[in-house]
Amino acid sequence: MYRKTYFCVCDGQQEEMYLKHVALLLKKFLERVVTFNTTVGSPEKLKKNYTEYDSAALFDYDFKDRQFHQNIVICDQLNRKNRRKNGQNVYHAYSNVNIDLWFILHKEDFNRPVTTNDAYVADVRRIYGLSQEADIKEKANLERILRQITLEDVKNAIRRAEQIRASKLESDCFKVGSTTCFSNPDFSIHNFLKIVLQDCGEL
């Protein structure tokens, strides 16, 4: 039986609930169990990961340049150190601008840049059938969103994110540590989830 556990540090409730939902989608009775042990905080918490698991930090850009760069550098440095030391992988899994865009990509293409943190909210409400006043970060609304996300949707989000990145011009990239980044929309969350799905035989 396939069993795999990841230790994940999350920006907040959205990321935590999303990972728990993905774990449910991947579960196959007597065949496969994928577990995300989650905690809320910054990637700094990964420095105190004393488990034997691969780990990831899920965070948003949120137009906070300094914090965003720092988060990526921490993950890259820990990845190099841990791989040398014990073969463990450390992944950054960011969404730029934020995870609301990642929810959109499960259902639709969206590749235009935005200038505010709440730019995706109307689209998320429309796609997932929420009222125009709904707080998409509220637990009950997040549950309603997640109930509509299938494993096929997760695969489609990965594919759409890859297409967005493939459409970027090389001249528009910038380096943060050893990571190549672009202005929004941009991601590395799709890379982490692709690795999770490939490792368990779903991709």
Image (cartoon, rainbow, N blue to C red):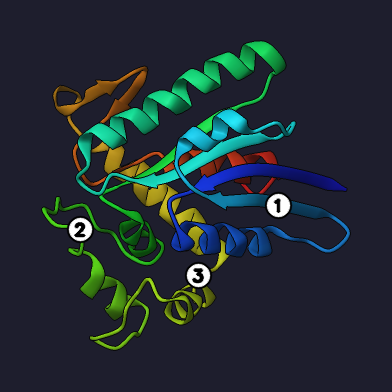
Q: Residue at x 72, y 51 (%)?
A: 34
Left-right relation of 54 to 97 = right
Give the SS element for disc 3. Answer: loop
Residue 10 percent coordinates (x, y): 49, 49
Gap in Å between the C-alphas at discs 3 and 1?
18 Å
Q: Nearer the viewer, residue 64 or 156?
A: 64
Residue 159 percent coordinates (x, y): 42, 48
On-image quarter of the C terminus: top right
Labelled disc at residue 149: 3
Q: In the rendered structure, which disc, 3 or 2, sits on the residue that comes first in sequence?
A: 2
Give the SS element for disc 2. Answer: loop
What residue would you read off at disc 1?
35
Single out the mark in the foreground, 3 or 2: 2
Q: Residue at x 26, y 21 (%)?
A: 175
Single out the mark in the foreground, 3 or 1: 1
Labelled disc at residue 117: 2
